[in-house]
Amino acid sequence: MSAVGEELAVSTPQTGVSGVLDTLYAIAALLFAWQVLHWIAGGLVLPSPLGAANRLALIAADPEFAGHAWETGRAFATALLISLIGGLGLGVLLGVHRLSSEVAEPMLVALYSMPKITLYPVILLLFGLGISAKIAFGALHGIIPVIMFSMNAVRNIRPVYLRSARAMRLAALQTGLHVMVPATLPEIVSGFRLGFALTLLGTLIGEMFASQRGIGYMLLKAMESNEPTTITALALLLIVFATCASWILLAIDNRLHRRT
Amino acid sequence: MTRAGGIRAAVIGGAAAALEIACHAGWIDPVSVIPPSQMVAGAYTLLASGEYYADILLTLENVGLALLVSLAFGFLGGLVLHRLPRLRQAIDPLLASYYAVPTFLFYPLFIVLFGLNRWPLVAIGFLFAVVAMMLNTLNGFDRVPVVLTKTARVMRLTRTQEIARVTLPACAPYIFTGVKLAIAYSFIGVIAGEFVLSGAGFGFKIAFAYNNFDNPTMYGLMLLLLLLVGSVNMLLYYWERRLYARQVRA
């Protein structure tokens, strides 16, 4: 059985230009479906794609927006750093010791599939309102998949690699650099990809409650004052950002996996 | 119990005991975290009072609805994509990055669309769960060994027989993985929605108790919720492991 997340990475071999063109058609079809829904539901409920894009341009031009975006970006970047470095460290530590990883695995699975939003009152009580609660919330979401993937990466190094390293009398540092890093890197990058996505989700959800600033807060405010156009515009911005980031990470991921 | 299982129980028990001691010794502010014994007492009181049954039931109903719809659509979607490779290739990049998008930000939009009732919650649970089901169904159909379909043809099974006796049993474990994830994700979606904005339900009551500084109720509810969701997920996790183990032996 595979680890969490791998289950969500069923890939199809891509074939050059025609594949990319088909994807563009699919995106066009989605936009068209959105437009049709807009016609059916009416402009007061669901804005059109063009309307959302125009609103986004307006929001982006507002001088206040830069502050919100900076705040979200700062919280997200910090949370991501904690998730990646902390998750990698813990994952490698657990992975090198078989019994520890056996002990930890079901606990991590349980934490991964738990609605962590339930813990938000505790986070707020511990960290107070503000950027540290958001960072904690983002890191809480993102760190678990990174731990799991790093742990499994280390655990699944083929023993023959380590035996060869010993046969060649590599020093510990050399074994690490030339054997362990290349052997584990693809899986670790897969974990980073999932960690990236979940940290973003966690940070935004954290901003929805725990904050007076940031894009999550803007979303919540737009929801309370019933402004579907603003909600859609912000959603569009985040979707484009997340999708582009995910494509870049996926491309790196696929490249590393193909090499091994 | 295995050795790992024993250590796991000891780790969890030790953490709870440490928290208990830290709370009683005053190292942790009782306004933020209360000792585990009081959490259990709070959970017991509110179970005994029966006051929250309606909310718990409502949440479970919403999760159930979201789950049913996402299983049906996810399975059909997986089947359709398996049959139409060109469509699959076209939307593959979108599916691959689906879980990178914080789907949750559609929740405010759903409230505007459906109004403040159960449907935005069901819709967000559905959005969280459906693609996991779809991808795993697809994976299941991909992994039916060619030798099995060939054998079915050699034995001149009809189309229905082949699906019922060969294809479905062969992809069952993968589809089960889809169901497992769909259950976890519809819980996450529905409860997150209840926290952000709703008028009733498990998550709403926790947020409500938090806003009223009612720590015993808040931690009691939280404990119940995490125990409930945690045991459902763990049950599915071990069941899944058994399914895959059987498949390897066969």
Image: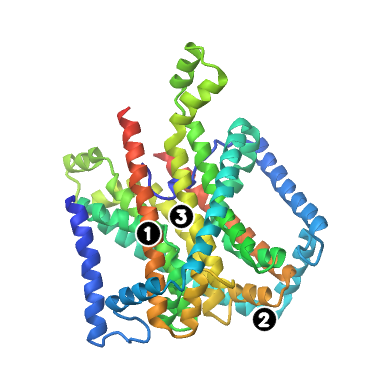
* Quarter-of-image position of residue A80: bottom left
**Secondary-structure class at tag 1:** helix
Numbered disc in front, either 2 or 1: 1
What amino acid is at disc 1?
A: Gly
* Of the pair A213 and B206, the residue shown nearer to us: B206
Q: Chain of mark 1?
A: B
What residue sits 81% from the left and 64% below the top? Answer: A43
Disc 2 from disc 1: Cα separation? 42 Å
Horizontal arrangement in the rendering, residue B170 relative to residue A19 (left or right): left
- Looking at the picture, do discs 1 and 3 lie on one chain? yes
User: Which element is circle 2 on?
Assistant: helix
Q: Residue at x 51, y 67 (%)?
A: B54
Amino acid type at circle 3 is Ala
Q: Which residue is mark 3?
A: B184
Give the amino acid type for the residue marked by disc 2 in the picture: Glu
At x 16%, y 52%, the residue is: B3
Mark 1 is surrounded, within 10 Å at the Cα level, by few (under 14), some (14 to 19) or many (20 or more) other residues, namely many
> What distance separates the C-alpha of mark 2 from that of mark 3?
38 Å
- The number of callouts visible is 3
Residue in the image at 55% along x and 23% along y:
B160
Q: Is residue B10 visible?
A: yes
Front label number (2 vs 3): 3
Quarter of the rendering occupied by the C terminus of chain B:
top left
The residue indicated by pointer 2 is A64
Rendered location of residue A83, percent (x, y): 40, 65
B117 shown above or below A121: above
Res. B22 image quadrant: bottom left
- Chain under callout 2: A
Residue identified by numbered label 1: B230
Mark 3 chain? B
Q: Are marks 1 and 3 in contact (CB under 8 Å)?
A: no
